[in-house]
């Protein structure tokens, strides 16, 4: 069995944890672990969304680059 420790919480934090309990017999530790798991999952989702976004940006950038490479003479362009 792991060591058990005591932590200090303001009464307001304890009340917030109490409100997050989904079952009457759920412990504060259960609630805290659940919150930690949710944060970890959210970080992974955000990371995956960022990766997908960067891939889309890179693909779009590559398309634009190829379009510019296809143009042989820039002097006829109106800037």
Image: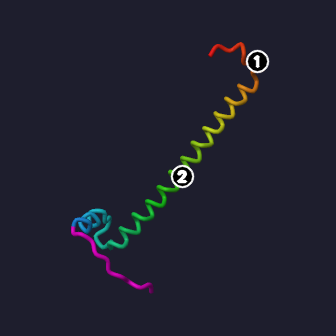
Q: Residue beneath label 1, please?
A: 73
Q: Position of residue 11 (x, y in %)?
A: 21, 69
For the point 64% across and 13% down, which residue is it?
78
Work out whether mark 2 precedes mark 1 in sequence or the reverse, and give the earlier one: 2
* Label 2 sits on residue: 47
Magenta run includes residue 35: no
Task: Give the x, y percent position of residue 6.
Answer: 32, 80
Q: How crowded is mark 2: few (under 14 residues within 10 Å), some or many (20 or more)?
A: few
Q: In this view, does 25 lie above or below 64?
A: below
Give the residue drawn at x 26%, y 63%.
16
Q: Position of residue 26 (x, y in %)?
A: 33, 71
Residue 22's place in the image compared with 6, above or below, is above
Q: Is residue 8 magenta?
A: yes
- x%, y% of residue 58? 64, 39
Q: Distance between the residues labelled 2 and 1?
A: 41 Å
Frontmost of labels 2 and 1 is 1
Stretch in magenta: 1-11
Q: In this view, does 73 lie above or below 40?
A: above
69 left or right of 78 in image: right
Residue 53 left/right relative to 42: right
- The image shows a total of numbered marks equal to 2
**Quarter of the C terminus within the rendering:** top right
Indicate the quadrant where residue 67 lies.
top right
Residue at screen point 52% across, 56% down:
44
Q: Residue 39 carries which label?
A: none
- Left or right: where does residue 73 sit relative to residue 14? right
Q: At numbered mark 1, what does the secondary structure look like: helix, strand or loop?
A: loop
Q: In which quarter of the image is residue 75?
A: top right
Asked if 59 appears above or below 42 in the picture, the reply is above
* SS at mark 2 in the image: helix
Front-most of 25 and 42? 42
**Residue at 59 percent of width and 45 percent of height:** 52
């Amino acid at each position: 069995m792991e060591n058990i420790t005591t932590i200090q919480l303001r009464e307001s934090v304890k009340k917030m944890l109490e409100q997050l309990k989904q079952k009457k017999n759920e412990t504060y530790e259960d609630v805290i672990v659940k919150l930690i798991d949710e944060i970890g999952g959210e970080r992974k989702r955000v990371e995956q969304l960022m990766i997908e976004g960067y891939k889309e940006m890179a693909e779009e950038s590559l398309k634009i680059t190829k379009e510019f490479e296809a143009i042989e003479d820039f002097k006829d362009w109106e800037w």
